[in-house]
Amino acid sequence: MMNYKSKNSSFMIKEFGLEKSNEKLSLNLYHYTSPNAFLSILKNRTLRFTDARYMNDKSETLYFLKVLVEFIEDHPNTYPLFNEAVNELLKGNSFEGIKSLSLNEISFNEVPKLPYRPSRHFLFCMCSECDSLNMWNYYVNNGFYEGYNIGFNIEKLLNTFSIEEENAVDAFLVYHGKVLYKEKQQMFEIEQLANTIEDKRNIWGDKALSYAILKLRSYIDAQGLFFKSNKFESENEYRIVICIADERIAHSENESRKYLGVNNKKMYEDFCVKRGLIVPYLNVVVPKEAISRITVSPITEFDIAKRSIKELLLASGYSSVPIYQSRIPIRF
């Protein structure tokens, strides 16, 4: 994992997975979305970062633990401190239930001797393909494709989390990177984590187990969101994850506590309805220049759609955003 502090920023941006894959990241990434969400993004210039506890695939939060348990079972003696930390953190849960992804909830044991600072995680998902039939298929309504994708320049999008003056916002973490689907890559990442923990055994001394559990729990909470089953590999997903302390999600009528820290006025919590549930999310204001292109789904009447999108862009203050039609041939 490559870590860097963004220039003139008081919070850390961490890049996940790219260093190991040796793959050059495309400058543009694509968010496939419904017409209503597309309209909201362009009009309000905000993106919804969904609370990770409410993802569509409920097995997502379990999947990393499945890989983790399989790793320690495959390496019972190689990483003694790491294995002990995994077993201590997850004791009380059925390992067979974890491996079968059948548990409804995971219970984590408290970190002994050290305070654990609970965090919330919110993520925004994109795709590396600008015209993917697999992704368009999520937006079929009565046999017709009704969706759009918004192309984002990833560097300009990440500038959302940059500021002009040092210490002008309250610190938090932002992770971004490609989702890992291949088991070999996933095991490599866990092996790196295990080696890091083992290498610090002597430094940590008599608190080695506590520090190992704390590091493991932090990794599970954030980086674990970049592990998915290879059944979803065709999605070619790229994620941005915001990690922010529970105590910073301020629920108060006091205006000074409305945002995630007094100064973070580009982000605020809100709620929406998904599958009948009330779901919390972060509204994040993004720079207009981050939007690089728009693609209209197959079948949608392109000429009419293009005309209305141009008018929307003009009315919303965007300039020179190209509009494309999907090139996927759909058979009626």
Image: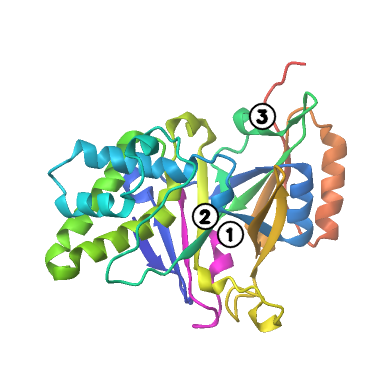
Say if 88 sits above or below 130 in the image.
below
CB atoms of marks 3 and 2 within 8 Å:
no
Give coordinates of residue 198: x percent, y percent: 17, 57
Q: State left or right for residue 278 relative to residue 90.
A: right
Spatial CA span between label 1 and label 2: 10 Å
Q: Are marks 3 and 1 in contact (CB under 8 Å)?
A: no
Q: Residues within 10 Å of mark 2 (few under 14, many from 20)?
A: many
Q: Secondary structure at mark 2?
A: strand
**Residue identifier under label 1:** 157
Pick the residue in front: 193 or 218.
218
The answer, for residue 22, to whether it is visible in the render is no
Along the line of sight, the residue nearer the viewer: 273 or 282: 273
Above or below for 114 versus 51: below
Residue where numbered disc 2 is placed: 240
SS label for mark 1? helix
State the residue at coordinates (54%, 35%).
Answer: 235
Q: Amino acid at mark 3?
A: Asn
Where 276 falls versus 99 (above or below)? below
Mark 1 is surrounded, within 10 Å at the Cα level, by few (under 14), some (14 to 19) or many (20 or more) other residues, namely some
Residue identified by numbered label 3: 137
| Picture quarter with the N terminus | bottom left
Query: Image point 76% across, 61% down: which residue?
Result: 44
What segment carries the magenta color? 155-178
Q: Which picture quadrant has residue 268?
A: bottom right
Q: Position of residue 176 (x, y in %)?
A: 47, 55
Q: Are the residues tagged 1 and 2 within 8 Å (C-beta)?
A: yes
Amino acid type, callout 2: Ile
